[in-house]
Image: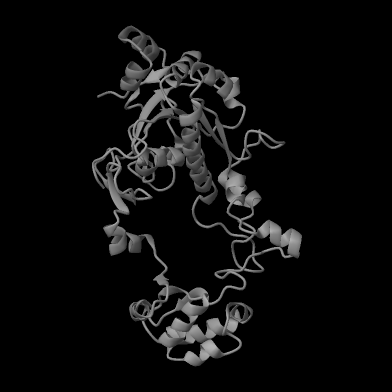
């Protein structure tokens, strides 16, 4: 990655909250060049510092989800701490928060109060159920959003309980919509001069990706369920075996691509067979065509199969593990593996910046900071905290700056 500033250079973001949905949105905004000031509780900080697999007591996820951020340790449960937030709000563009709705109202840090200080302020809320509605005040984790948003119902194998995708999908989708909403509000502010609230509910972020499932149910009487590794009526598009035990996904469901697959298999008669000749017929005879293709793919190694698919213009790819990603030349060519040195000097791999920019290239990401490492610099520079006030706030435990 290169040494420029990123397309969001000049925007300041005040990140309040913890865990994934809000902080991942903050990570993305920081990836694009915004200055992200992450407010953390003194002493404990964001639980993500200790989340998941740890090394030396620190999460291996933390360097990525907190990258490019400045850690400012302020106790929001203290009146003096909340006053510091109000002073910072006067100097920022965006407040990003994922507290349970009502918390900021109780603290006097709601949008009505903060926009009176800064009318251009954009306040981005990420919560389980949104800021309104009968469940607005309920606790809502990403897993609940995935259930209520519909994706759990369609994930897994027929006849078995629903499964999850193996990542925090609901939280991440909410973060993506938070970034999209933020950028839309920034664009509108350029014309109106006014800020506004952006309200992201996790369940809605999931539901927005559920394609035509509601229409299928209401209009056609079809309720999509769990279909394993395939989509109903879409064939061939599945994972196929190889002689060396690998798993290769082949997506040849379009008619023209299926014909190319038949050529690769050395059996062009398949593309003329009424059972497989066109998309609808293949969808109705999915098990049969998958069995034929599986019998063919298991006669060769994954490497040979992928080369045959490449030569014939058929989309295919090995099912990657993390190790495959780390060693793939395509990932390397597009800077999709960056290594972030944590405070112990360990270079920890993480996904690169997505998308790529041709001109305003973001700088190489910097690993997540130590707790409170930027507190004094930020408060002195933006909130006007002088030496005497700093000494008083530090003595009272309202703010924390690590030694050294």
Residue at position x 48%, y 79% in the image:
256
Residue at position x 49%, y 80% in the image:
258
Position in image of residue 280 (x %, y %): 62, 77
Looking at the image, residue 60 lies above or below residue 330: above
Q: Which quadrant would the C terminus be assigned to in this image?
A: top left
Q: Can residue 329 be seen in the rendering of this structure? A: yes
Q: State how many labels appear.
A: 0
Residue at position x 36%, y 41% in the image:
31
Q: Residue furthest top?
A: 388
User: Which is more toward the observer, 157 or 15?
Assistant: 15
15 relative position to 365: left or right: right
Position in image of residue 48 (x %, y %): 44, 39
Q: How is the image coloured?
A: one colour
169 relative position to 217: left or right: left
Residue at position x 37%, y 36% in the image:
8
Q: Can residue 371 be seen in the rendering of this structure? A: no
Q: Residue furthest front?
A: 191
Looking at the image, residue 140 lies above or below residue 325: above
Q: Quadrant location of residue 215? A: bottom right
Position in image of residue 61 (x %, y %): 39, 45
Position in image of residue 285 (x %, y %): 61, 82
Q: Quadrant location of residue 278? A: bottom right
Looking at the image, residue 74 lies above or below residue 385: below
């Amino acid at each position: 990655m290169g040494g420029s500033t990123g397309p969001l250079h000049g925007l300041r973001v005040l990140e309040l909250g913890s865990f994934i949905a809000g902080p991942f949105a903050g990570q993305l905004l920081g990836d694009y060049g915004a200055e992200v000031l992450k407010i953390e509780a003194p002493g404990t900080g964001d639980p993500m510092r200790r989340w998941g697999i740890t090394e030396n007591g620190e999460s291996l996820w933390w360097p990525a989800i907190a990258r490019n951020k400045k850690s400012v340790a302020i106790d929001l449960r203290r009146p003096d701490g909340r006053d510091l937030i109000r002073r910072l709000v006067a100097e920022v563009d965006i407040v990003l928060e994922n507290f349970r709705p009502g918390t900021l109202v109780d603290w006097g840090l709601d949008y009505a109060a903060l926009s009176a200080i800064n009318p251009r302020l954009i306040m981005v809320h990420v919560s389980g159920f949104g800021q309104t509605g009968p469940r607005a005040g309920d606790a809502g984790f990403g897993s609940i959003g995935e259930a209520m948003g519909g994706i759990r119902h369609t994930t897994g194998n027929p006849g078995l309980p629903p499964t999850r995708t193996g990542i925090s999908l609901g939280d991440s989708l909410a973060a993506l919509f938070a970034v999209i909403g933020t950028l839309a509000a920034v664009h509108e502010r350029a014309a109106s001069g006014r800020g506004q609230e952006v309200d992201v509910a996790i369940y809605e972020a999931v539901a927005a990706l559920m394609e035509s499932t509601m229409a299928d149910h209401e209009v056609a009487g079809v309720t999509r369920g769990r279909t394993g590794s395939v989509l109903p009526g879409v064939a061939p598009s599945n994972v196929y075996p190889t002689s060396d035990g690998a798993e290769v996904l082949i997506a040849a469901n379009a008619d023209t691509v299926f014909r190319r697959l038949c050529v690769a298999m050395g059996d062009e008669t398949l593309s003329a067979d009424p059972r497989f000749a066109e998309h609808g017929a293949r969808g109705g005879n999915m098990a049969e065509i998958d069995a034929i293709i599986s019998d063919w793919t298991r006669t060769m190694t994954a490497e040979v199969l992928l080369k045959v698919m490449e030569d014939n213009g058929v989309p295919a790819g090995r099912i990657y593990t993390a190790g495959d990603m780390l060693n793939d030349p395509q990932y390397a060519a597009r800077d999709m593996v960056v290594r972030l040195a944590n405070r112990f000097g360990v270079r920890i791999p993480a996904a690169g910046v997505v998308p790529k920019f041709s001109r305003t290239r973001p700088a190489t990401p910097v690993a997540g900071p130590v707790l409170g490492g930027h507190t004094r610099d930020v408060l002195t520079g933006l909130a006007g905290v002088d030496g005497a006030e700093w000494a008083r706030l530090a003595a009272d435990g309202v703010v924390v700056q690590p030694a050294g």
